[in-house]
Amino acid sequence: MLRDFIVSLDTERNLTEIVMAFSEGCVLIEKELNNYDRTNSVKLGHNISGDIQKPIDIRANHCIVSCLQEREGIFYLTSEEEDKTRLMYEGPLNPFPENIYSVAFDPLDGSDNVDCNGGVGTIFGIYKETNEHCQNGKNLVCSGYAIYSNPVIFVITFGEEVYEFKLNKDEIFTKTHKNLSIPDNPKRIFSGNAGNISKWIEKDRNFFNWVVSEREKYTFRYTGCMVFDIHRILCQGGIFIYPSDSKNKNGKLRMFYECMPMAFIVEAANGMAYDGKGRLLDNHVLTAHQKTPIYIGCKRDITIYKNFYQIDRKKFVIETYKGSGSEELSVDEGEIIRDYTVLNDDRWSRVTSMDGKTGIVPTKCLFLE
Ligand code: F6P
């Protein structure tokens, strides 16, 4: 059971209770979704980040808030569906209390999918509160998500392992056998809204064109629900992107309660999260609803993406080469490589493939496109 498992990790009491509050809130949301009239297309307007707000968003928010309100140890509460951060703590501030946390969450990620029975989830981050003027990724002590599939899955990490639980018929989360970790030999999956490509910066367009080039053998998966798409990547590998574009200068997804919590989980599962300039978790959260570009997934794909300016500038291509011999890299004709160094007598070059493998090929096979 979820509580027994968290306690068995020697988790601090308030933190245990806050994680339990999120799990209970997710069970309530599951019930709301089951009873939701999907023909009811009422829209309440937009939330502060610009997403359409539906009655189910408000209900889901209420489910989580009502469970958190019963718990101690919460300082600030930030929800995607509430304009302002709430101060929850009413005790003394001097000295600043120990074991106190701030929570940030997206109660119903992907709620655009609700009307068509598509995937939706909940994302949350629990940050150690230090009473500095802003939060940052280093203060994350736990993050998690739920996906409302069959069964409902609840995933959490305290920064090392990523644990998965599923909801049984008695409404109890029980641990599944395996911890989540991106496979060592990850699948080539690309997940992003390519409908925006004309608005992307050149680097993103080039990366996308590389991904879809026939030889790279990536496959496309995109549900319109970040938590679903990233869950797939945790299970199988690949990359999810939501870049900045000419309309959304900082991307669309929110740093505090979407991207940082997911980055914390993906890093613990042997992956990486990048914001287009550096490690996503190295950021400071300056405003509750601030947005960030995000590139998240397996180390292979994020590394390829990060190096893409370099590739784009050089575009080294193997002209004709069928590798053989132990030191030679087996690359195919037309393969784009990341980098190369010409060796002593100019006849051979050491090249690095897009996957980061190095080897030697005849220099005459290289040309700059
Ligand atoms: O609000 C967040 C979200 O619904 C994510 O879950 C999802 O990845 C993204 O927005 C989808 O946005 P778009 O419709 O622009 O692809």
Image: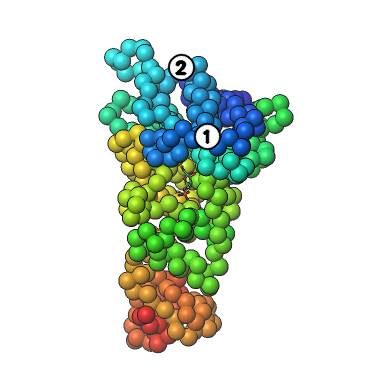
Q: Residue at x 43, y 40 (%)?
A: 51
**Residue linked to disc 1:** 42
Whether residue 244 sits left or right of residue 182 in the image: it is left
72 is higher (above) or lower (below) than 155: above
Label 1 and label 2: CA atoms lie apart by 35 Å
Q: In front: mark 1 or mark 2?
A: 1
- Left or right, residue 22 beside residue 176: left
- Residue 242, above or below 48: below
Residue nearest the viewer, comparing 73 with 55: 55
Q: Amino acid at mark 1?
A: Val
Kindly identify the residue that appears in the image at 35 percent across and 33 percent down. Answer: 288
Q: List x then y, in percent, for residue 272.
A: 44, 50
Identify the mark at residue 161; answer none if there is no mark: none
Note whether ligand 1 is within 8 Å of mark 1: no
Image position, residue 189 (x, y; %): 54, 59
Within the image, what quadrant is residue 291 found in? top left
Q: What residue did someone put label 2 on?
A: 72
Under circle 1, the secondary element is: loop
Q: Earlier in the sequence, mark 1 or mark 2?
A: 1
Q: Nearer the viewer, residue 190 or 340?
A: 190
Q: Viewed as shown, does residue 69 lie left or right of 179?
A: left
What is the three-letter code of the residue carrying label 2? Glu
